[in-house]
Amino acid sequence: MSMRSLGVVADADDEDTSPAPVATEVSSRTTVREATINLICGGLGTGMLSLPWTMAGASVLPGVLIIIAVVLVNVWTIVILIHAAERHQQFNLGALLRLLPGRLGPAAQLLADAAIWFTTYLTLVGYIDAIHDSSLLLLPEDSWLARGRLPLTGCASLIVLPLCFLDQKYLSFTSILGILANVNLLAFIFVTFGQRAAADDLGKGSCIFGFGKGTLTMVSTATNSIIVQMCILPMYENLENRSPERYTKVLFVAFACLGVLLSVFTIVAYLVVGPLVDGNVLKSFPPTTLWASAVQVGMIVVIFAVYPIFLMPMVAPLRALDPSWFLRGGPREGGGGASLPLAESRRRIFVNAVTAAIVAGAFVGALVIPDLSFTNALNGAIEVGVFTAMGPGLIGLYLLDRSSKVWKVSVSTLLVMGAVFFALGLAFTNNYVDGLACSWGLGATDRVSALASTSGILAI
């Protein structure tokens, strides 16, 4: 969550505000350890809150296999991107796509930019949904804020609006805050699992292996949880002593850890609640204890902190517009340099107006789309089609010096399968738990085995 947004924002800010590019470049280098931690933290956002819900429609074993497959495919496609970036010295996804031959380049760049903008907007909608869900659990039932979605979503949007005008340096604490909130959430889920398993009170009707349409939704939701392709290139560029081989090692370590964390979290949360787990898993854990309340409050605070960071890339291109765009008579208005303060003032007003409009749009979106799981599934479907398949696939075909038949078939298969799962992801956005054909359900004896297995994983 924080990694994905901070990576994009930092890159945009370097272009706009760095007075000494060389000094900034050296000071902003990240170590292998920092890059690894950033990638792991990037998968621990609101996207993972819907994974137990999709596992309810896919069952445990297929769900874990999907998470592993999504992790492996995303690592491969990121490797494609970093090799192409190093070869062409372009460390921005849009700039790299623009190098594609003929009209394909501008068209692919336009599609990728539009997808980034729209998926970021959906993320902001999901943030307001998550704030609403957690806040509602903390409020008394007779509170006026609990009467419909309008009061809470409206208050959340009004609170976040002024935060969007703060300088990014005042939001630098969000990475640490996000880590603490996620560690607290994971610890709470694991401890709750242990307590309920010991009391033989795990969710009834959980399925270990079955077949259902929910597996299609889980592909989208898992992708949404770990996708980083849109901002991976600036992160790669900032790696000290960078090389594709060095960063590939970072990717394998980070995504291996992320795959284990997401798999264990998803299994444990699903087994604790059972097939009726909510699309936002936090709604399945009402704040009946102080720790449970702290989990809900922590998520609210983190989302308020990262919301402005996610919004920044949406307006960054507007901040970079030439001031002459904001002069009625073009560059000659006001005469030379005297017009620059006026143009910059108009640009600032314009950017602020667009920022307010985006916040208002996310507020409306949260009213129309009250379900975090739907937002995550829809986002994931778009990300599968554009960032996992289209971008890396076309770049792998045209911008890397690889001409073997095996390579061309592999990359072409990526493009085709990406298009297929994009279409299926748009069509299937529910978990379809009622249609799951379960071949192996979880009984009382199996719960003890599940506890032992999970405990063994955590001990490792």
Image (spheres, helix red, strand yellow):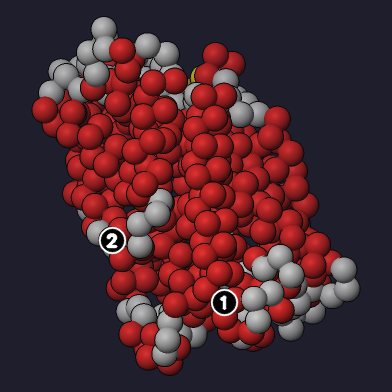
Query: Can you name the residue that lies furthest to the top here?
Result: 142
The image position of residue 342, as x and y in percent, is 55, 69
* Alpha carbon separation for disc pair 2 and 1: 27 Å
Which residue is at a point 69% across and 62% down the rendered structure image? 391
Which residue is at a point 75% across and 43% down the rendered structure image? 420
Q: Secondary structure at mark 2?
A: helix
Is residue 407 something that shows in the picture? Answer: no
Q: Which residue is mark 1?
A: 340
Q: Nearer the viewer, residue 419 or 453?
A: 419
How busy is the neighbourhood of tag 2: few (under 14 within 10 Å), some, or many (20 plus)? Answer: few
Q: Is residue 27 above or below residue 324?
A: below
The amino acid on which the numbered mark 2 sits, given as a three-letter code, is: Tyr
How busy is the neighbourhood of tag 1: few (under 14 within 10 Å), some, or many (20 plus)? Answer: some
- Residue 67 appears left or right of 35: right
Q: Nearer the viewer, residue 263 or 358?
A: 358
Q: Secondary structure at mark 1?
A: helix
- Residue 360 appears left or right of 282: right
Q: Which residue is mark 2?
A: 170
The image position of residue 438, as x and y in percent, is 51, 19
The answer to whether the residue labelled 2 contacts the one labelled 1, judged by CB atoms less than 8 Å apart, is: no
Query: Can you name the residue that lies furthest to the front here?
Result: 334
Which residue is at a point 37% across and 47% down the rendered structure image? 162
The image position of residue 286, as x and y in percent, is 25, 20
The amino acid on which the numbered mark 1 sits, given as a three-letter code, is: Leu
